Amino acid sequence: MSTHVTTGTDWCLVVDREELYEGYDMGDWGRIDIEPAVEETPFARHLGDTVLAAREEWEPRTGRMALELDFDSGTVRCESWAGDLRITAVDASEGRSAPVS
């Protein structure tokens, strides 16, 4: 199983568990490729770790807009920003998200 994080058509944040699947072609809209996580992603250093705590932010009309997950080794914030998915490592010393590119 894997955790799937994306944004919905209503700009909400979608987080669910699902089996890995093959990539697929979306014609004029491009291609979806499934690849292993790279070292630069905010989740890379937490793979296999247990989630210690989770905090959600909700918008009454669309539902979940952000989710912060705490691990022993740090925190990751997932959020929908105008329909785009943003995933950032949270800098615990400053108490705010620090973008990772």
Image (cartoon, helix red, strand yellow):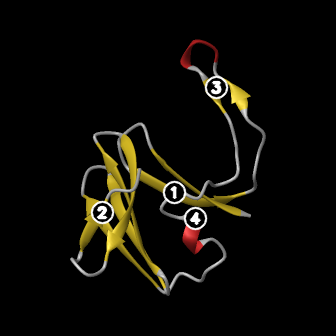
Q: Gap in Å between the C-alphas at discs 3 and 4?
A: 23 Å
Q: Against 96, is 41 above or below?
A: above
User: Where is residue 26 shown, x and y percent of the image?
Assistant: 64, 21
Q: Nearer the viewer, mark 3 or mark 4?
A: 4
Callout 4: SS: helix
Question: Is disc 4 surrounded by few (<14), some (14 to 19) or many (20+) residues within 10 Å?
Answer: few
The tag earlier along the polypeptide, 1 or 2, is 1
Q: Who's the residue at 53% across and 64% down the image?
A: 43
Q: Nearer the viewer, mark 3 or mark 2?
A: 2
Q: Against 86, is 33 above or below?
A: above
The tag earlier along the polypeptide, 1 or 3, is 3
Tell me the tag on residue 31. 3
Q: Quadrant of the N terminus?
A: bottom right
Callout 3: SS: strand
Q: Who's the residue at 28% across and 40% down the image?
A: 82
Q: Which residue is mark 2?
A: 98
Tell me the tag on residue 44. 4
Q: Which residue is mark 1?
A: 41
Q: Nearer the viewer, mark 1 or mark 3?
A: 1
Q: Are marks 4 and 1 in contact (CB under 8 Å)?
A: yes
Tell me the tag on residue 99. none
Question: Is disc 1 surrounded by few (<14), some (14 to 19) or many (20+) residues within 10 Å?
Answer: some
Q: Who's the residue at 72% across and 29% down the image?
A: 24
Q: Gap in Å between the C-alphas at discs 4 and 1?
A: 5 Å
Q: What's the amino acid at mark 1?
A: Thr
The tag earlier along the polypeptide, 3 or 4, is 3
User: Where is residue 56 shown, x and y percent of the image?
Assistant: 34, 70
Q: What's the amino acid at mark 3?
A: Arg
The tag earlier along the polypeptide, 2 or 4, is 4
Q: What's the amino acid at mark 2?
A: Ala
